[in-house]
Amino acid sequence: MSIIEARNIERSFDDLTVLSGLDLDVAKGEFLAIVGRSGVGKSTLLAVLGTHDLDHGGSLRIADTATGELSSSELAALRRKYLGFVFQDFHLLPSLTAMENVILPAVFSGGTLEEARAQAEKVLDKLSVRTNETPTSLLSRGERQRVAVARGLVNNPSVLLADEPSASLDEESEKILFDLLDDLRRQQNFALIAVVHSTAVLHRADRILELKDGILHEVV
């Protein structure tokens, strides 16, 4: 059974059609790389798959649950249970430490602060992040990116959606980041759906799909 099943997804902005009858199945544990020219709709696709963009046609199932039938609170619970997110611009809170940024999703999921801290410490340790530093003043861009990844993984998601997770990283930092993601993906068996811009990353993917003319084309 696929962890994500998307059928005939349509998404338009005024007169601009971005997604046009798009189908996608994602198996748990696989690394799916999404490529395509700038502005083609890759971030929109991630927003739809992550249930942040609900203004689309077609159907989406996550863990065999039809998202179109859920209330806003049920959708939020589904996200917390199954989905993790890594945003291109990180979305870290600058006044909080790395640990505090990572704890937030675990706390919002209803766990105790002690449970959230224990899980955050485990993920941050795997990613080699300094837990008590703040994002703006004391962490490098590569470390901030790893904090963002840790936050996405703190709830042990079934799917990690990442929008250009290595954007603006140098080649060595990008390699370190994807080495860590590969190791964690194998250990935790989550699916990684990543928009990627670097050709150096593509050999790691189980499948490469190009978004073009509103649908996904498999790249051989």
Image: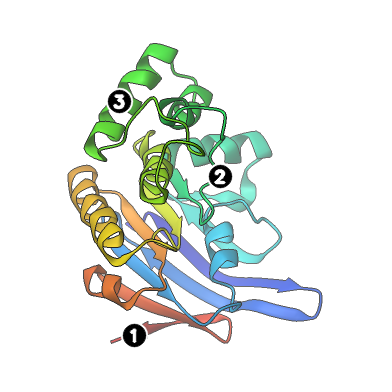
Circle 1 Cα neighbour tier, 10 Å, few/some/many (<14 / 14–19 / ≥20): few
Q: Quadrant of residue 197?
A: bottom left
**Residue 77, placed above or below residue 9:** above
Which mark is nearer the camera, 1 or 2?
2
Which SS class for mark 2?
Answer: loop
Name the quadrant containing residue 166: bottom left
Q: Decide if residue 136 is on the left or right side of residue 176.
A: right
Q: Amino acid at mark 2?
A: His
Return the residue at label 2.
91
- Residue, x 28% and y 70% (percent of image)? 201
Residue type at mark 3: give it. Answer: Glu
Q: Residue at x 48, y 37 (%)?
A: 135
Q: Identify the residue position indicated by label 1 in the image.
A: 219
**Where residue 212 sits in the image (x, y, percent)?**
52, 85
Q: Assign a secondary structure to mark 1.
A: strand
- Disc on the earlier residue, 3 or 1: 3
Q: Residue 76: x and y, percent?
A: 58, 37
The three-letter amino acid code for the residue at tag 1 is Val
Relative to 115, residue 13 above or below: below
Q: Which mark is residue 121?
A: 3
Above or below: residue 64 compared with residue 20: above
Count residues near mark 3 (Cα–Cα under 10 Å), then give few for <14, some for 14-19, many for 20+: some
Q: Quadrant of the N terminus?
A: bottom left
SS of the residue under disc 3? helix
